[in-house]
Image (cartoon, rainbow, N blue to C red):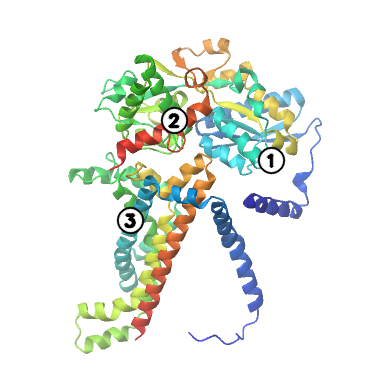
Amino acid sequence: MSKPKKSQLPGFGLTLGLSLSYMSLLIFIPLIALILYAAKLPAADFWEIIVDERVKSAFKISFLSTFYAAAVNFFLGLIIAWVLARYQFFGKRIIDALIDLPFAIPTAVAGISLSTIFSSQGIMGKILGVFGIDISFSRAGIVVALIFIGLPFVVRTVQPVIEELDAELEEAAASLGANFYQIFVKVIFPSLLPSLLTGFALAFARGLGEYGAIIFISSNMPYQTEIVPLLIVKKLAQFNYAGASAIGVTMLVCAFVLLLLINFLQVYAKRRSKN
Amino acid sequence: MRMQFLGRAILFALAAAAGFGFLATPVARAGEEFKLLNVSYDPTRELYKEFNEAFAKYYQEKTGNTVTVTQSHAGSTAQANAVIQGNEADVLTLALAYDIDEVVSKTKANGNQLLPENWQTRLPKNSAPYTSTIVFLVRVGNPKNIKDWNDLTRSDVKTITPDPKTSGGARWNYLAAWAYALANNGNDDAKAREFVKQIYANVPVLDSGARGATNTFVQKGQGDVLLAWENEAYLSINDVAKGKVEIVVPSLSILAEPTVAWVDKNVERHGTAEVAKEYLNYLYSKEGQRIAGKNYYRPSDPEVGKEFTDTLPELKLVTIDGDFGGWAKAYARHFADGAEFDKIITELHKK
């Protein structure tokens, strides 16, 4: 990327100033306050909180379930976006609008509905129970809730890219004798990968912090189904602000590092698809 | 501290923008309008809805002033936290004295102590105008034949109770089970621990609050018995789960004393000290006591209590002060990080 020339549009100073103050007020200052609060803890105490067995297992549960859910959304979201972008069918507009619902529904409502449907008394729970599968009150339940929460992120980032895909490229590939499989793997997928990764990263980041939807479908059992945000809430409930902010900051750093990695991957994918 | 400072700076900026409207101290005169914010816990919603109307009427007749009470409900500890963080509650009506004690000590540490240490002595009966207890809710017909606490240790009985780390009600459940075990094992502490551990071995879900646990039991059909506040249990059998569940009163339970207090610093600033005190004192009046009884809280006035013995039968109740040495001690022993409850759960669930 070359440095952009001074824009012809006026108002650069004003808009940048507004953006910066807005970002500071809403994002940087609260984050710095959180870090300063955690920094009050002596390093040894901080370390002791983080390496506690229960905290470690909560981190494992949180990151793994969020990863699984984002991975499912990576593929499911691609298929849904593909269907919505490429085909015309009855009720398409309605399905298109439904995709955004997880954004709008209060997550607690989503959690309660999902756990009711998937509990042993619910419709889905009864059917799955025949096969011996329990969703509600298990780790699988956490993943189901996170799939629900994260789906729109992948669909909405990939869908416009599919719509913009140049049909000529596919036609050219076909006329050169490529079959559908080859076209998809060699032509379409590489150009979709950057946006897929963005969707994956958004769904992953959103899922890590999710609390409302999960606590209703999970059994919240320490070492089994206890997620990091719940652990933070428990510390707060005991007026242990330092402990809560220590776990919060660790979560923040881990998430930031992961998102940074995904961003690098995305840049790499973009470069590859351009060549 | 920094966050608080920032919060206050923003508040002041807003106040300045609003023309310092809310900093003006109202002077009491006939025809005055008062606003009270009652920060309470989850299950008192229905109780205070009825009480607020009765109080507004009484206050208007007595003084000619009108009063509008706004209610706020959430988990008791979460509410205490909100007040520590600056929620401008005029009165607190929380699930246990410990939560109000925490408001005192945490705001004292911040240099802005909201109410005095001796708050609990300012109103009659340890500032507990009504009491409650813990009972069992079972499926209709009691298919698992659950009669008392010892049935909860059976391997075929699954118990639903929320997480005592986040739920005030769940702490009462836990301590009631402990007290029953002590009473039936010659005060043997180790046996009581084993008894409680056996109950938690059959707890499939730890909800974060009492309403969540009720939902898990009633709507999602999990478990065989729900440990519930007496008033929550009645709400379930009269309303949400009519005909599906019934109440079992165990041989022994625990006396829960939800406590109330006005928040000195806040009422001074709002000019609501008089009306806040009047509000809380009215809870002790015959009418206040009857409203409590009607909403399945046990009136502290024994005369009014007699009117409700059908729904709120007498039973053997242990107390936190008498049997557990007070909340501070019980909390440190059982619910603090790494204390008894954490140890029990770790023994049960760590792979």
Q: Which residue is drawn at 53% across and 47% down?
A: A242
Q: How many numbered discs? A: 3
Q: In this view, does B264 lie to the left or right of B301?
A: right
Q: Which residue is drawn at 56% across and 61% down?
A: A27
Residue placed under numbered mark 3 in the picture:
A64
Residue placed under numbered mark 1 in the picture:
B112
Amino acid type indicated by mark 3: Leu
> Percent x, y for residue A159?
37, 71
Q: Which residue is drawn at 60% across and 86% down?
A: A6
Up the image or down, A52 lies above or below A36; here it is above
Do the residues bearing badges 2 and 3 touch, measured as CB atoms within 8 Å?
Answer: no
State which quadrant residue B119 falls in.
top right
- Residue B334 numbered tag: 2
Subunit bearing disc 2: B
Up the image or down, B218 lies above or below B303; here it is below
For the residue pair B302 and A50, the one nearer the viewer reads as A50
State which mark lies toward you, 1 or 2. 2
Task: Give the SS element for disc 2.
Answer: helix
Q: Which of marks 1 and 2 is nearer the N terminus?
A: 1
The residues bearing labels 1 and 2 have C-alpha atoms spaced at a distance of 29 Å
Residue B311 appears in the rendering: no
Amino acid type indicated by mark 1: Asn
Whether marks 2 and 3 lie on the same chain: no
For the residue pair B297 and B227, the one nearer the viewer reads as B227
